[in-house]
Amino acid sequence: MDTSTALYLTMLIPIVAMAGNMVWKDQENLRDGITFLCAVLTFACVLVILSNVGNGTTEAFELFEVVSGLSISFHVEPLGLMFAMIGSGLWIITHIYGVGYMRSNNEQHHARFFACFSIAIAAVMGIAFASNMFTLFLFYEILTLSTYPLVAHKGTPEAVKGARIYLGILIGTSIVLLLTGVIWTFTIAGTLDFTKGGILEGKIAPSLLPVLLGLYAFGIGKAALMPFHRWLPAAMVAPTPVSALLHAVAVVKAGVFTMLKVGIYIFGIDFLAATGASEWLMWLAAYTIIAASVVAMTKDNLKARLAYSTISQLAYITLGMALATSMGALGGGMQIAMHAMAKVTLFMCAGSIYVAYHKTDISQMQGLGRIMPITFGAFLIGSLSIIGLPPLGGSWPKFLLMMGAADAGHLIIIGVLMVSSLLNIAYLLPIVGRGFFRPVTDTNLPKTFAEAPLLVWLPPAITATGTIVLFFYAGSIQDFLAPIVENRP
Amino acid sequence: MSVVETQHAAKTLMDHLPVLQVVIPLISAPLIVLLGNRKLAFAIAFAASATAFIIASLLLAQVTDGSVISYHIGGWAPPLGIEYRIDALSALVLMLISGIATVVLPYAYTSIKFEIPKRHHTLFYALYMLCLTGLLGMVATGDAFNVFVFLEISSLSTYVLVAMGAKKDARALTAAYDYLIMGTIGATFFVIGLGLLYMATGTLNMADLAGRIADQGANRTVQAAFTFIVVGMSLKAAMYPLHHWLPNAYTYAPSAVTTFLAATATKAAIYVLLRFMFSVFNPAFHFEDWTLYLIFIPFALLAMFAASFVAVFQTNLKRMLAFSSIAQIGYMLLGIAMLNATGLSASIVYLVNHGITKATLFMGTGAMVMYSGSAFFDNLNGLGRKMPLTGAAMVAGGLSLIGVPGTAGFISKWVLVQAAFENGWWIIAVLIMLSSLLAVIYVWRMFEVLYLTAPDEDCTATDPPLPILIPMLILAGACIWFGFDTELTLGSARVAADGLLAGSAGLIVE
C-alpha cells in the first residue's frame, strides 16, 4: 500500500466505525466488534506508513485547494507519525476498556458515544498528518466539536455545565486568538505550510513576535496553559474512557502537539532562540507546572486531581518548545508519548475503581489496594512514570528537558523540574499508600480479592507494562524524532 | 437577408438573458393570478424561478472573466434608453436570489398550508414572484431610477407577504405596518437622493452618472444626494441602528417568507449600496471615505456586538436569528468600509454565504414550528433528537453562522479578518473574532435546547415530508460545500471586487 492511501485510510476507517455505530445502533456486539476491527486497521495503516517512510518527511499530498494558497493537504513527518501511533494505538486499548466500562456501568446511548469517539480519532489523525496550519486548524475544531457530545454525555445539569465550559474555552480561544494568529501569519508570510526552520523569519518585526507567539500559545486552548486551563477539570464530568483517551491522550496531546508543530515549523526553534521571543512563555509554562501541581494536591476527587496533574505535565511540552533548544524540543516530543502512556493508565485505573466500587474521592479509597491489587499496581507504575523515576518511560523526557534548560542557560528551570517531581510524589503516591496500607473503613467492601471486570482492569495493566517497555526504547524514540530539530533542511 | 436573420436569431437568446432574468418572473405573477389554481400557481412559480436561476448561472458564466454585459432595453441606446448591466457582482447576487427563491418554493408549498388561509395561496405565489422580480430587477438594472421602481415592487409585495402571517399571529399585521412605514421612509430617501442627482447631472443612467459626477467633483447637491441614497438603502439593508423593522417582520412573517427575505432582501439592498458607492460615486470622493470610516465602521461594530448581545437573550428562536442577521449585516458593512479588494470580496462572499446559512436556519426553524406550534425555546425542547435530519441541518447552519472551519461561514470570516490585517487594523480583526464568541453563545443555546433537553412525553414530531426535507438538506449541504469549494463564491466575489474597485472606469458606455 502506498503512503498516501494509508494516510487517507487512517482518517476514513474511523469514519467507517462511526457509520457502523449509527447503522447497527442496537446490536452491541456487532457494533463494538466493528469499532474494534476499525481501531486495529487504523493502527495497521499507521504502521504501514511507518514502514514506508520511517522517520523521513514526505512531500505534501494535496487533497484540494480551498482558497488559493490554502489547501487541505497532508504529509508525514516524525512528530506527527509518533502522535498518530499513540492516538491509534491507544484507541484500541481504550476501546476495549470503553466497552467494558460502558457495559458494566450501565451508561446510556452507547452507539452515539462510540460514534463521536470515532470521529474524534479521525480528527486526531487529521491533526497528526496535517501539512499546513489551515488543515490542522480544521481538524482541531472538528476534534473540539466531536468531543463536546462526549463531555455532555450524561445529560445531567452538571454535565451540561461542564460541557459548556469545555466548549466555551476551547472554541473561544481557538477563534479569538488562534484563528487571528493564523490569519495574521498567512497575511505576512503568504503561506501556512509547515516548513523546517519556520516561515516567519524576516517577515515580522521582532517586537511583534512575542505577541504572535502569545496568540498561538493561548489560542491553542487544548494545551491547557494557564490561565486557559479550566476546561480540563470541567471536562472530567465525562465518562472515564473519554477522560482517558480524549483528555489524557487525544485532545490535550493534540493541543501540545500543535504547540510543538507551531514552534518548530511555523516559528522555527532557531528563530525563537535568536529573538528570545519565547522566554516569557517559558516562565509561564514553568509557573503552570508548579501551580497546577499545587492545586492537584488540594483535590480529593481522584479525576480532578489527575486533571490538574495533566495540566502540569502538559506544560512540560510547552516548556520544551519555549526553551528553544533542540534538546528541549526533543524532550517535549518525547513527553507526548511517555505522558500519554502513563496518564491513560492512571485514568483507566480511576475508572476501574469507579466501576467496581463507585468511589470517586481519594479519602474513600482506604484499603482498596488490597482488594484490587492489579488496578492499584498499575496505578503505582503509572504514577512512578509521571514522577519520572527509572526504570519507567517518564524519566527520559525530564532528563532531556533538563539538558535543554542547561543548554539554554536557565538553571532555574532545572530547579522547577525537580520541585515538580517532588510535588508529583506528594500528590500521587499517597493515593497508592492509602490503598495498600490503610485499613479498610467502608464495611460494605469485600474482604478479599475482588477486581473490576476483566475488560476494565486488563487495559490499564497493559499500558502500565507499556511504560516500563518504553523506558528501554527511549533511545529509538529519540533517534526517530531527531530529524525534527536537525538544522539542515 | 435570411442569413442575417438567422444570425440575429441565434444571437438573440443569449443576448436577451439580462432582460429575461427579470421578465420571466414578472410575467409569471399576473399569470398565476389569472389562472387562479393553487397547484398550477406553484408549478408556474417554480418553473419561472428555476428558469431565473438557470439564466443567472448562464450570466455568471459569461462574466466571471471580469467582463460586463450591457443590454439596451428596446434597442434604445443609453443614457436615453434603459440599460441592464451584468457584471460578476450582479450575476453572483442574481444567482443567490433566484437560487434561494427556487429552493424555498417547494418548502413554501407545504408550509403555507399550516400558516396561510387556503384562499390566499395563489395570491401568495403571485406576490412571491413579484417580490422576486423586484429583487432581481434591482440587481440587474444599470439605471438608477429603475432601481427605485424595482425596490418598490419588491417592498410592496414584501409588506403583504409579511402580513400574511396574521393567521397564526395577529402581530404580523403590526410588523408589516412597521415595515411599511420604515421601508417607505427608506425608499423616499432613496428617491430624493436620485432626484438630487438628476438635478446635478441631468441623467439617471449609472455609468453616465459616474462620468458626470467625476467631471463636476463634489458639490453640495451631490453630497446631499449621496447622503440620502446611503441612508435610504441602509434602512432597507437593516444597518444598525436603522434595523427596527427587521426583528418583528422576520418573527411574525410565514416561515417561507422569512426564509426567503432573510436570505435575499437585505442582500439586494447591500448590493445597491455597493453599486452606488463604487460604481456611481467614487471611493476617492472624500465625503465617501469619511462616511465609511466615521459612520459605517462604528455602526458596523455596534451591530456586531449589540445585536449579537441582544440575540443571546431572546426566548424565541426566530427572533434570535433575526437579531443575528442584523449583527451579520454589520460584518458585511465592515468589509465594505475596509476599502480594499480583500475587504470588498469578503463583504460579497459574506453576503452569499450568510444568505445560504440563514436560509438553512430559518427553514429548519420553520419545519420545527410546524410541529411545535411556536418558535419559543420552551416549545422546541429536544426536537433535534426527534427530528434528526432537521436537527442536522440546523447544526450545519449554526456552525456556519459561528464560522467553524469547514463551513461557508468560516470562509467569509477568514477573508474579512485577512482584509483587516492587510489594512493593519488588528484591533478590528480582534473585535471581529470577539463578536464571533457571542455567536457561539447564542448558537449553542439553540443546540442545547434542541439536543440536551428532554422532549415532551407525548411529542410526536418526526422529520418533515420530503418537499421540505430536500430543500433544507440542499441548503445545509451548501453550507458545508461552500466551506471547501470556494471557486464559485469567493472566486466570483474576487472578480466582482476588482470590478468595483476599478470604479466607474469599468462602466463606460459603449
Image: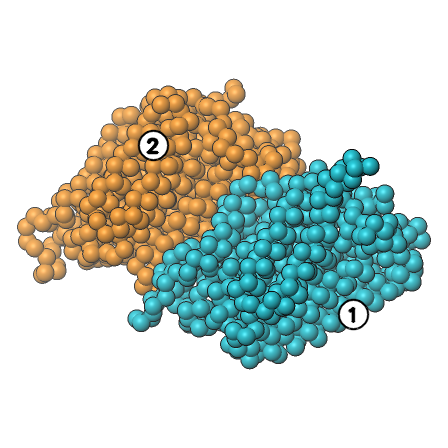
Chain colours: A orange, B cyan
Where residue A178 appears, as percent x and y from the top left, is: 53, 45
As drawn, the residue found furthest toward the top would be A488
* Residue A163 position (above or below residue A400): below
Do marks 1 and 2 share a chain? no
As drawn, the residue found furthest toward the right would be B216
Location of mark 1 (residue)? B188
Location of mark 2 (residue)? A85
State the residue in front, A350 or A206: A350
Q: Secondary structure at mark 2?
A: helix
Which corner quadrant holds the N terminus of chain B?
Answer: top right
Where residue A201 appears, as percent x and y from the top left, is: 61, 30
Q: Residues within 10 Å of mark 2 (few under 14, many from 20)?
A: many
Which corner quadrant holds the C terminus of chain B?
Answer: top right
Residue at (24, 33) in percent of width and height = A466
* Residue A408 position (above or below residue B35): above
Q: Nearer the viewer, mark 1 or mark 2?
A: 1
Residue at (55, 45) in percent of width and height = B482
